[in-house]
Image: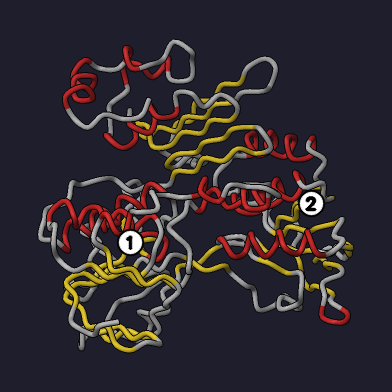
Amino acid sequence: MKNDRVRYLVVGNSTAAIGAVEAIRRLDPSGTIRLLSREPHHVYSRPLIPMLLEPDVDLHRLDLRPRDFYEAHGVDKHLGLAAERLDPRERTVWTREGPVPFETLLLACGGKPFRPAEVGGLDACGVFSFTGWDDAVNIRSALETSKVSQAVVVGGGLIGIKAAEALRARGIEVTLVELADRVLPLALDARGSRMAAAAIRKAGVELLCGTTATCIEAPGGRASAVRLRNGACLPCGLVVMAIGVAPNADLAAGTDIRVDRGIVVDDRCETSVKGIYAAGDVAQGTDALTGASRPIPIFPNAFWQGTTAGTCMAGGEPRPAAAFAMNAVEVFGLPTISVGLATASGEGTEVLTAEDEAGTSYKRIVLRGNRVVGALFVGDVDRAGIYTGLIRDRVDVGTVKPLLTTDEFGLLRLPQQYRKHLVLGEGIEA
């Protein structure tokens, strides 16, 4: 690898990195782009990694971009080559193959699984995370080479539920353990969570809430059981730790780049060091609904941040966009979507809810003033995109508030000026 100073250096190879590469090439067709990635794989869609547990999956189905993406965009790619050290003052990143001097840098390092130090036995054989390609492949290998009949998944969030679903599809007896009093506690309210829990149990998964793992028993170095805080002991041959993901900000730690929970960025995705940007799960930006500075580790935000960073790196002006939480997950066949402050309540907050007679569909709309700030859908999610647009564009819905939770509500019920904006401007997915 040549050590010439590169115009654009990208560390990472997921959603944010791809957004940046595409944005750079729209403005600069010839500037040198070099990409470093710890993982050796072609860019893939992380939400699809449960597919890797399928016995005969077509690996190309996980591709986030065509196989010729790097060549078509003139990217000098180095997959399987990790960035090991960063010196912002020297404008240099070091790898095992030597230094890489740069003019501008994007840190799109993603997140890393949270591993609680108080839980013993995490290094035992048969204990896995479930956030990347290799995690899923290693789990599949364990299922194929060992006689695993029982598994414990620790964590009832998005990752834990998809891990439990993938294992159950392989015929494994699964117990799902969640510390909170309900599953998906950050995305769903109590009613929505009860519906999700019913779908989980209907699929044959044992669900235990209000407790968590304290120790993984591993005689001989192989996981054989999980001990819980409530005193229970769950026999198993495989454990998935899905407690959470933290920003992988190690490369910036100890440098002039400001790091809090993640790498702190402004609305241009620039860090505290000029010319160095961060995007995706590693970045900590401003939540448009709360004004708080926090990581927002979701696919749409990662792509928008990468596009914003790439545009700025190439000297362009990015389009402003509002960043806020959005989660979509199908829980054993039950679709759920939560947007913005979907579970908020309290003073200054108005909550509208609706549920069908069969109890298969539930909707929760959260307003402050006459503006929607949160929306939750369980079962029927067809119009979630409309509400997402209302939140993003801060639309006054005072005239249609009584219709927000009814089947009568749709784009035609919105103010004419807003509908005109959707047609002539940058619309929303409806």
| Mark 2 → mark 1, Cα distance in angstroms | 35 Å
At label 1, which amino acid type do we have? Ala
**Mark 2 crowdedness (10 Å alpha carbons): few <14, some 14-19, many ≥20:** some
Element class at badge 1:
loop
Describe residue 290's horizontal placement relative to residue 28 as left or right: right
Location of the C terminus by quadrant is top left
Q: In the picture provided, is 323 more to the left or to the right than 202?
A: left
- Residue 96 vs 115, above or below: the answer is below
Quick one: SS at disc 2? strand
Can the viewer see residue 289 in this picture? yes
At label 1, counting other C-alpha atoms closer than 10 Å, the crowd grade (few under 14, some 14-19, many 20 or more) is many
Q: Position of residue 20 (x, y in %)?
A: 27, 57
What amino acid type is highlighted by mark number 2? Leu
Q: Residue at point 61% right, 48% down?
A: 185
The spot of residue 10 in percent (x, y) is: 30, 68
Is residue 268 depicted above or below 410 in this figure?
below
Q: Is residue 232 visible?
A: no
Residue behind mark 2: 208
Given residues 383 and 52, the one toward you in this image is: 52
| Contact (Cβ within 8 Å) of mark 2 with mark 1 | no
**Residue toward you, 404 or 122:** 122
Quadrant in the picture for residue 128: bottom right
Left or right placement of residue 344 versus residue 295 in this view: right
Residue 201's tag is none
Q: Is residue 185 above or below residue 266?
A: above
Is 326 left, or right, of 150 in this rendering? left
Looking at the figure, which quarter contains the N terminus? bottom left
The percent coordinates of residue 292 (x first, y second) are: 35, 57
The foreground one among 189 and 240 is 240
* Colour treatment of the image: secondary structure
Q: Which mark is residue 279?
A: 1
Residue at 67% x, 14% y: name it: 357
